[in-house]
Amino acid sequence: MFPEPFTEEWWESTEADFQYQVEDIQFPILESREDAVNRVQAPEGSGYDPDTGSLLLGIPYLRGADRDFLSDLVAESQRLIPRLEEMFAARTVTAEFLFRLNRFNFIYGYIAAIVMFQSDDLGPERAKEASQRYAAATRTVKQQQLKWVSHMLTRQLDLHRSRKQAEHDVAKAIELYISRGKFPEDFPRVWFEQILTANGDLRSSFQQKNHTRKTPVHLPSDAARSS
C-alpha cells in the first residue's frame, strides 16, 4: 500500500527515497572515452551493485550517450539537491517542490539506466586499440632484432667471411648465447629465440640479403661480444 499523498507517512517515505538517490549520485565521476577504451574491466567505483541495490559513483562511458547532455544533467542534479533538502524539511507542497522533485527523479533514472547498462559498449574499439598497440610493439621488437643481427653480420663480413659463413657464425653465436641462459636487461630469452628457426638457422628476414651495412645499433652489447 502506498501512503496517502502529502501525509507525514508520505513525506517520510518520499524523503527516504530521495536521500537514497542522493547518496547514489552525489559528486559522480564521468568516465572519459580514453579511460573506457584503455580499461580492461569496469572502472573501480562505477556501475550497479546488485548486492546492495545501489548505484556507485562512477558513470561509465557509453558510445551512444550524449556526454554534454549527461554532464549538464549531472550538474543540474547537484544544484537540485540542497534546495530539495530544504523543501523536505519545510514539509510544504508547492508547484516548485513537485517540479524539482520530478526533475531530480528523471535525472536519477537517466543516470541509473546508463550505469546499469550491461553490454561492453566499447568492446570492439578496445580490441582494436589493443591490437594496434600490440602491432606497434611487435614492429619495434622486430626492428631492434634486425638492427642487432645486422651489426653481428657486418662484423663477420668485415672479417672477410662469406655471406653463408657469416650467417652460420651469427646463428651459432646466438644458439650459444641462449644456452648460457644469461640475458641483458630488457632482452629476454624469447627475444633471441625469435631470430632462429627450429633448425638453428637465421630466419629468412634476418639473413644478410635483408640488411644494410650502415644500420645504427643500440642493442644487447653482451650478446654482440659473444660472437
Image (cartoon, rainbow, N blue to C red):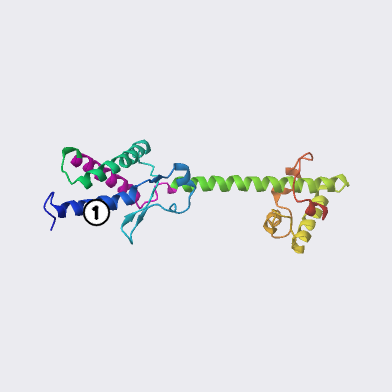
- Residue 33 within the magenta-colored segment of the rendering: no
- Between 146 and 22, the one lying in front of the other is 22
How many marks the image carries: the answer is 1
Determine which quarter of the picture holds residue 71. Answer: top left
At 73% from the left edge and 45% from the top edge, which residue is drawn?
147
| Residue 221 at x, y percent in the picture | 79, 51
| Residue 172 at x, y percent in the picture | 79, 58
Main SS class of the magenta portion in the image: helix
The residue under label 1 is which amino acid type?
Ala
Q: Quadrant of the C terminus?
A: bottom right
Determine which quarter of the picture holds residue 183. Answer: bottom right
Specify start and end residues of the magenta stretch as a single range: 97-123
- Residue 108 within the magenta-colored segment of the rendering: yes
| Residue 91 at x, y percent in the picture | 18, 46
Q: Quadrant of the N terminus?
A: bottom left
Tell me: 196 left or right of 67.
right
Circle 1 sits in a helix, a strand or a loop, which is it?
A: helix
Q: Residue furthest front?
A: 90
Q: Residue furthest left?
A: 4
| Residue 55 at x, y percent in the picture | 34, 53
At 52% from the left edge and 48% from the top edge, which residue is drawn?
130
At 20% from the left edge and 45% from the top edge, which residue is drawn?
90
Determine which quarter of the picture holds residue 158. Answer: top right
The residue identified by callout 1 is 16
- Between 13 and 226, the one lying in front of the other is 13
